[in-house]
Image: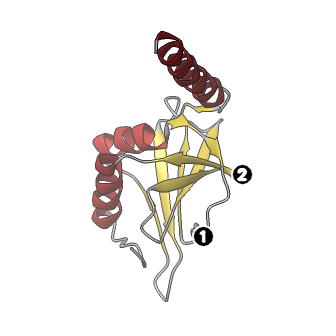
Amino acid sequence: MKRLIITVLAIVLLGVGVRTVLMLSQPLIDPSFATEARVRFDYGDRPIDVAVTDQGDLESLKEIAGGRAAKNCPACSFEYISITLTNGQKSITFWPACDGDPLIRVNDSDRYVRMSGRETQELHRILAKYGIELPHG
């Protein structure tokens, strides 16, 4: 019985260790440098291209875009909305999924950041404030 417990514990610890290594190998997206943001929406007959003017919205967007970017290949559509965070010299552009999935694609890559439920709601609030409603989801 003692041997079984030790074996199970070793397997669990190995699994946690492998998951931690995999998570830490994912690049960290750090948009803290950004001093301005621009939101673009191209869907239907009313394209929108607007600067984010509210400092609180800018800080929320930086928080939403930050985190570990996992390599993934989701079936989501990411083409309608882009949000660019910049300081004039450096920038990060991210595209929220338009089908209700809590994912954002980072730059032109196959890297994605998963949003929490709170972050997803905050992003929807900010987009609505600037006249954008997601076409799906």
The residue drawn where x is 71% and y is 54% is 108
**Residue 57 in picture, x, y percent from top left:** 32, 46
Q: Nearer the viewer, residue 115 or 134?
A: 115
Label 2 environment density (alpha carbons within 10 Å; few <14, some 14–19, many ≥20)? few
**Residue 35 in picture, x, y percent from top left:** 47, 36
Does residue 105 appear left or right of residue 58 in this picture?
Answer: right
Q: Mark 1 — residue?
A: 79
Q: Does residue 72 sit above or below 130 in this rendering? A: above
Q: Does residue 115 sit above or below 81 in this rendering? A: above
Label 1 environment density (alpha carbons within 10 Å; few <14, some 14–19, many ≥20)? some
- Three-letter amino acid code at disc 1? Glu
Q: CA distance from mark 1 to mark 2?
A: 13 Å
The residue drawn where x is 65% and y is 30% is 22
Q: Nearer the viewer, residue 125 or 53?
A: 125
The residue drawn where x is 44% and y is 39% is 62
**Residue 64 in picture, x, y percent from top left:** 42, 43
Q: Nearer the viewer, residue 112 or 35?
A: 112
- Three-letter amino acid code at disc 2? Ser
Q: Does residue 135 sit above or below 56 in this rendering? A: below
Q: Earlier in the sequence, mark 1 or mark 2?
A: 1
Q: Nearer the viewer, residue 28 or 75?
A: 75
Q: Mark 2 — residue?
A: 109
